[in-house]
Amino acid sequence: MLRLAIQKSGRLSEDSLKLIRECGITFISSSLKLKTESTNFPLEILYLRDDDIPGYVADGVADIGIVGENVLVEEGMQALAVEQLGFSKCRLSLAVPKADEYSDITDLEGKNIATSYPNLLQSYLQEKGVQAHIHTISGSVEIAPSIGLADAICDIVSSGSTLISNGLKEVERVFKSQAVLIANENLNADKKQILEKLLFRIHAVQRAQKAKYILLNTPNEKIAEISRLLPGAKSPSILPLAEEGWSSLHSVVNEDDFWEIIEKLKDAGAQGILVVPIEKMIV
Ligand code: ATP
Ligand code: ZN
């Protein structure tokens, strides 16, 4: 049995549970419970505050966990990271009141900066050779300048709308973050094996998220040209259509590449293009 710690309720919770479910692991989740056991995979899920997850995994109370890199690095536990998961993407940024003049980081010399991430901020300032007073507060950082607590803040930003609504502007990006899977460094052989199985499934889910299945109709004489336009496809499948001289071509494309090549495919004579999601992808 492997114990996984995830955030009980917050910005990591939903996507963490979604990833586990997409891995085919079923369990009954209840917001009132502190732990649940999967019915079809040797996994137990613990619901915790995100800040506690690295410590619990380091101590072996949980075997693995899902946490933001911002929290992991802030707590000095980057050694536990196993895999970036691609969700809960955000950044830790410095912001100042909108009306303040700001040209570069040296403007923060000697200033008061409020943050919940003193270590990440301190190492950024040190790297830039700037000395400032860091005030560690645990929440509502964005209101610190308006109540006279600080000249600037260093906080998590994703769209930037919270900053704007608090009369602030983003001036420096301190750290880029996303959710990571972390693991205790001394897992026994049984647990390691379960983790390998879980990682195999996570990789299949991640690959499928980027890939799309593409089907299109092409005149036979254009098959070679169209195949060349489909990057990443080792070798497309080609099926004859009932209509003489036409074929259906099936392949896998990266969604980002697809938008680049759609016009070229049409110019080359492709018709009836269908792009469909892939649920799992094993290579
Ligand atoms: P807890 O009650 O568990 O301590 P919290 O309030 O500290 O929760 P959340 O706001 O739920 O934490 O954020 C959890 C993590 O999600 C953050 O550490 C960060 O990695 C990521 N995150 C935070 N804000 C955003 C955002 N706006 N968009 C995407 N990811 C975010
Ligand atoms: Zn937290």
Image (tube, grey):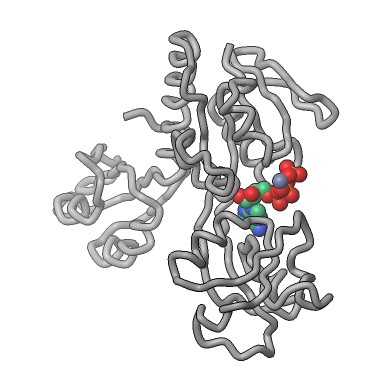
Give the percent coordinates (x, y) of residue 171.
56, 77
Where 270 sits versus 239, above or below?
below
Residue 100 falls in image quadrant: bottom right
Give the number of marks: 0
Give the percent coordinates (x, y) of residue 9.
76, 40
Left or right for 259, reference 201: left
For the C terminus, the image quarter is top left
Residue drawn at x 44%, y 13% is 193
Where 44 sits versus 21, above or below?
above
Residue 128 falls in image quadrant: bottom left
Q: Nearer the viewer, residue 177 or 174?
A: 174
Residue drawn at x 61%, y 62% is 158
Residue drawn at x 60%, y 46% is 71
Q: Nearer the viewer, residue 157 or 217?
A: 157
Residue drawn at x 42%, y 32% is 203
Give the percent coordinates (x, y) of residue 37.
69, 16
Give the percent coordinates (x, y) of residue 199.
45, 27
Residue reaching furthest to the top: 190
Q: Nearer the viewer, residue 89 or 223?
A: 89
